[in-house]
Image: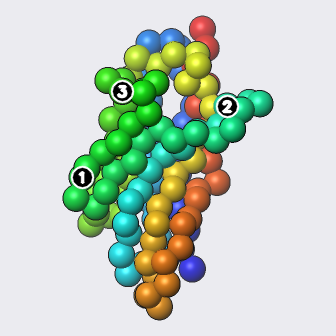
Amino acid sequence: QVQLVESGGGSVQPGGSLRLSCAASGSIFRINDMGWYRQAPGKQRELVATVTPGGTTNYADSVKGRFTISRDNAKNTVYLQMNSLKPEDTAVYYCNAYVVDTHIRGMNYWGKGTLVTVSS
């Protein structure tokens, strides 16, 4: 069994910053891509950013230049540094990872989500 646990959400004023973390634990053999998605009220879940094991990143156009995704492979952890936050960034942010477990079974895992609220 594999678990993803997010932390770091909260409330911030426009222009502020937050850093999200997501740690994977359990019967992990290897973690492939990791990423962050978000879902705003009344909207579908959307991609925010992804990072490969080698550090190649991909961002949604709406967050390019403001958000930075990174990972620590030794700690099985992915981060999302969010700067210059806007009210439209308000959403529940979900961690995602494709994990190969110790039985060499690959599955896509999701965290439970952490709420980010940007408001004055």
Amino acid type at circle 3 is: Lys
Q: Are marks 2 and 3 in contact (CB under 8 Å)?
A: no
Left or right: where does residue 24 sit relative to residue 32? Answer: right
Residue 89 % position (x, y): 55, 24
* Residue ID for mark 1: 55
Q: Which mark is residue 79?
A: none
- The residue depicted at 46 percent of the width and 66 percent of the height is 98
Q: CA distance from mark 3 to mark 1?
A: 16 Å
Bin the neighbour count of mark 2 within 10 Å (Cα to Cα): few under 14, some 14-19, many 20 and up.
Answer: some
Q: Identify the secondary structure beneath mark 1.
A: loop
* Residue ID for mark 3: 64
92 in relation to 5, above or below: above
102 in relation to 97, above or below: below
Q: Nearer the viewer, residue 83 or 46?
A: 46
Left or right: where does residue 57 sit relative to residue 38? Answer: left
- The residue depicted at 57 percent of the width and 47 percent of the height is 94
- As drawn, the residue found furthest toward the front would be 61
Q: Identify the secondary structure beneath mark 2.
A: loop
Q: Quadrant of residue 74?
A: bottom left
Amino acid type at circle 1 is: Gly
- Note whether residue 61 is visible: yes
* Residue ID for mark 2: 40
- Note whether residue 11 is visible: no
Q: Identify the secondary structure beneath mark 3.
A: loop
Bin the neighbour count of mark 3 within 10 Å (Cα to Cα): few under 14, some 14-19, many 20 and up.
Answer: few
Left or right: where does residue 37 sit relative to residue 17? Answer: right
Amino acid type at circle 2 is: Ala
